[in-house]
Amino acid sequence: MKNNVAKIVLLFVGLISLAGLLWFYFPSQNKLTRITVLGDSKTKIAPDTAIVTFSVVTKNKQALVAQQENAQKSEAVKKAVENTIKDAVTEIKTSGYSLNPEENYSLKSLSKIVGYEVTNTVSISVKDLNKVGEVIDAATKAGANSVEGISFVVGETSPSQGNALSLATKQAMAKAESIAKSLNGKIVRVVETREGGTPNLGGYDEADSMYMNSNTATADRKQYNTPIQAGSLEVRSQVVLVVEIKVG
């Protein structure tokens, strides 16, 4: 009998202790809540990089001749561009190459291959925006006869990117503080921070390609420099904050 009483007493003491722990722990936990806020910033800045894409297009009845002519002109274009931008930070890369047959479908019989077209497309990233017009002029004079487009962008390491993110973060934090104040609480800590959107880095884009015949230039024709204006870009950044608020 005494053993049963002792067990009951111990169980009672244990329940009281457990209740005390639960009372001590859960009320403080119940006072904490998490919210997620979004900061969104937009700013206009000057671009720091221009991407020029152009092609050398050659045609001939024989595939090898078209290919060799293209290789010769492409090498000339490459050297001309390198000489123009030798003092600027740039990146030159091949973005496309194709050799396609040209067929005559007007015949009633089966189609007949009448020639071949070779296209070598190159993209150049130019950091010195004052050199963009010179690059286009040098490339076309050397043999490039198709300009696919020009894009102005902001580099990922640009300070402007950091400024846009900073503005978005401050906006998100201001929202969180307003919510906490409306709940008669305060922010305890920031649980998570992440970039919530893709910055809009696109800028001026000359989408329409310009096809030019490099053979039309003559020595006695007045030469003009290509004017290029970069303008400004709109950079958008989004930041998501998850914060913990203590209420009461």
Image (tube, rainbow, N blue to C red):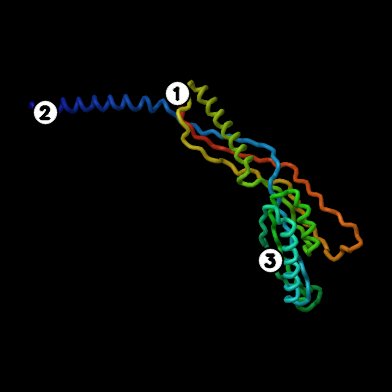
Label 3, residues with CA under 10 Å away: few <14, some 14-19, many ≥20 = few
Instruction: Tell me if residue 98 comes above or below residue 195 in the rendering.
Output: below
Decide which of 22, 173 is in the foreground and name it. 173
Instruction: Tell me if residue 8 comes above or below residue 47 in the rendering.
Output: above
Residue corresponding to mark 1: 247
Residue drawn 80% across the image and 77% down it: 108
Q: Position of residue 191 (x, y in %)?
A: 46, 35
Instruction: Tell me if residue 191 comes above or below residue 150 in the rendering.
Output: above
Residue corresponding to mark 3: 97
Quarter holding residue 65: bottom right
Indicate which disc, 3 or 2, sits on the residue closer to the N terminus. Answer: 2
Specify the quadrant that holds the N terminus.
top left
Residue drawn 77% across the image and 63% down it: 144
Quarter holding residue 92: bottom right
Q: Mark 2: which amino acid?
A: Asn
Residue drawn 71% across the image and 48% down it: 152
Indicate which disc, 1 or 2, sits on the residue closer to the N terminus. Answer: 2
Q: Which mark is residue 4?
A: 2
Task: Tell me: 212 left or right of 122.
Answer: right
Q: Mark 1: which amino acid?
A: Val
Q: Which mark is residue 188?
A: none
Indicate which disc, 3 or 1, sits on the residue closer to the N terminus. Answer: 3
Secondary structure category for the residue under label 1: strand
